[in-house]
Image (spheres, rainbow, N blue to C red):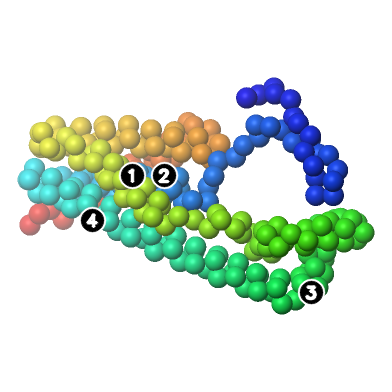
Amino acid sequence: MVGRAARPKPGPLGTLARVPIDHQHRNLQGGGARAAVFGISDGLVSNVALILGMAGAHASGGAVRLAGLAGLVGGAFSMAAGEYVSMRAQSELMLRELDVERQALRRDPEDEHKELVAIYERKGLDSGLAEELTSEIMRDPDLALETHAREELGIVPGQTGNPYQAAASSFIMFALGAFIPLLPWLFVHGTTALLWSVALGAVGAFSVGAALSHFTGRPWLWSAGRQLLISGVAAGVTFGIGHLVGTG
């Protein structure tokens, strides 16, 4: 809540620092939010392009439905598998580096002490203050590991990503995005279904882009317009190729 008073909080050297009570950031380490955004965007763009490509080739309504459904299911599994493997590999790599740092702190605490002092001095701290701050941190093994991991590796222990969350989020959101242009073909066919796919795809792309601006902080109109342009180009190119090649 804006306007609430800050409360004093003990600093690392016993000093009091004023920290805003409600200063919060989104947790972006788990991978679920990123996978959801990419999933719905990829599902929408890829399936609207696939469906319009088939429609441009004058394929039957049944063939378009089959292609759209195959694109939805196959793409959702592919995205989920890709996210799982990617996040799992990233998590395992981070955990390995954390273990290397943990062993270094156990074997060579003096070298790690000097290393952290040097890091703080490069950041602009006075050598005396850097030494005092490092001494305080190194007294707590967990804090020492967290600090070294953050300063040297850019890693926060306990926030190495969740591959299951990323995979599930990617699967669901890809399927949702891919279903939007497929929906009309479940009820109608031909030009009517084609026009509805274009309309729903445009609305979906605009909405996804606008929602994305909530995470990035960019102007919503710019983000929505970019997403609409990307989807439109992909759909236009595949429709043109389908029209030229045909089903023969």
The residue most toward the front is 140
Is 74 on the left or on the right of 14, as rendered? left
Disc nearer the start of the sequence (3/1): 3
Residue at the image position 71 percent from the left and 33 percent from the top: 20
Residue 127's image quarter? bottom right
Disc nearer the start of the sequence (4/1): 4
- The dot on residue 76 is none
Residue at the image position 46 percent from the left and 51 percent from the top: 31
Residue labelled with disc 3: 111
Query: Does the CB distance between marks 3 and 4 fall below 8 Å?
Result: no
The CA span between labels 2 and 4 is: 18 Å
Q: What residue type is labelled 1?
A: Met
Residue labelled with disc 4: 74
Residue labelled with disc 2: 37
Residue labelled with disc 1: 173
Q: Quadrant of the C terminus?
A: bottom left
User: Of helix, strand and loop, which one carries label 3?
Assistant: helix
The CA span between labels 2 and 3 is: 43 Å
Residue 95 position, x and y percent, is 54, 66
The answer to whether residue 111 is seen in the rendering is yes
Residue 6's image quarter? top right
User: Of helix, strand and loop, which one carries label 2?
Assistant: helix
Q: Nearer the viewer, mark 3 or mark 4?
A: 3
Query: Does the CB distance between marks 1 and 2 fall below 8 Å?
Result: yes
Q: Which of marks 2 and 3 is in front?
A: 3
Q: What residue type is labelled 2?
A: Val
